[in-house]
Image (spheres, rainbow, N blue to C red):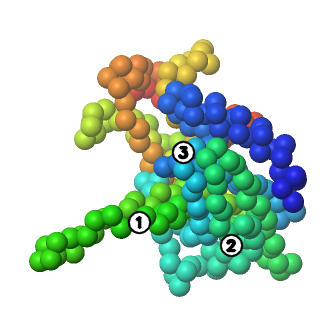
Amino acid sequence: MAKKFTRPIRATLAAFAALAAFGSLLPASPASAQGDLLVAPTRIILDGRRGAEVILSNIGSEEATYRIGLELRRMTSTGQLIDVETEAANELEQAALSMIRYAPRRITLPPGQPQAVRIAARPGADLPDGEYRVHMSFRAIPNPRPVTETPEEGEGISIKLVPIYGVTIPIIVRHGRLQATVAIHDPKVVAGQRGPELQIAMSRSGASSTYGELRVTRPGSDEPIFMARGIAIYSELAERTVQFDLTPEQAAALKGQLRFEYRDMPEAGGALIAAVETVLG
C-alpha cells in the first residue's frame, strides 16, 4: 500500500522544503504548519466520485504521533470559526460527518518522514443537493516523559503543562450543481486598535461557499497595491466583514480611485467572483 503514495509524497516533500525556507515571504500557501507538523493541502473539495489525500510531514527532530479526527465548525460574520458540538449539529453538518471516510486515524512519523491520509466521501443516493463541510484535525499526542523530580514533602503538587499542537483543515463535499454570488460593499480604511485597517463588507448568496483572494488596483493597472489571499465565505453566511491591518505606507496608497476584486485563487483559475470601483479619501 505504501508504494501507492511514493511519487506524490516525494513531490510534496520537495514543496515542504521550499515552503519552510520561504514561508515567511508568502501571505498564504498550500501548506499549513503548527508546532512540528506540516500539512498540505490546507483545503479539500470532494464531489463524491473521487477521493483525495492530505500529506503530513514531521519537520521536527523527534518522532511524533498525531491523532486524526473530524470536527464541526461554523463561521461567524467576522470570519471566526467556532466549534459546534455534535449534539447541536444541523442536518447538513450531521450528513457531512456521516459521509466522510478517512484512514489512518493515528500516525507516528519519524523526523522528516511524510505520510498520506486518504479521504473519501460516500453521499447517499437520496442526499439533497448542497454543500457539506467538516473540519479535519491533526493533533499531536505528547510523548511520555520520565518523572525526574518529585516535590519535597509539604511543598504541594508539582504540575507541568504540555501544549498540544494541531492543524485543522476544511473538508468540503459539493453535491449537485451549486452556485454562489458575492458582492463587495463599502470598502474603507478605518482606525483600528493596532493602527490603520482596511475594512470591507461582503455579501454572499447561493448554496456554495467561496474562497479566493482580494486584489486592490488602480484603474488602468493590473499591479495590485494591496492583496490578501485565502479569504473564505462559508455557505452558512450571508454577510461577512473582512479586515486587514495596514502599514502607514499601505494606508497612504489606498486613496483615490480604486478597484476592489475578489477572485478565485490562482491555482483554481483566478476567475472574477466580485468587483467594485470606488474612491477612498
**Residue 277 position within the rendered picture, expressed as x and y whole percent measured from the top left:** 53, 29
> Distance of mark 3 from mark 1, alpha carbons?
19 Å
Q: Does the rendering let one see residue 244?
A: yes
Checking the image for residue 219, the label placed there is none
* Quadrant of the image containing the C terminus: top left
Q: N-terminal of the two: label 2 or label 1? A: 2
Residue drawn at 58 percent across, 61 percent down = 65
Q: N-terminal of the two: label 3 or label 1? A: 3
Q: Which residue type does callout 1 highlight? A: Pro
> 173 or 178, which lies in front?
173
Q: Which residue type does callout 2 highlight? A: Ala
**Residue 180 position within the rendered picture, expressed as x and y whole percent measured from the top left:** 68, 53
- Secondary structure beneath dot 3 equals loop
Q: Nearer the viewer, mark 2 or mark 1?
A: 1
Checking the image for residue 146, the label placed there is 1
Q: Which residue type does callout 3 highlight? A: Ser
> 49 or 192, which lies in front?
49
Checking the image for residue 96, the label placed there is 2
Checking the image for residue 61, the label placed there is 3
> Distance of mark 2 from mark 1, alpha carbons?
41 Å
The quadrant in which residue 139 appears is bottom right
Residue drawn at 41 percent across, 38 percent down = 244
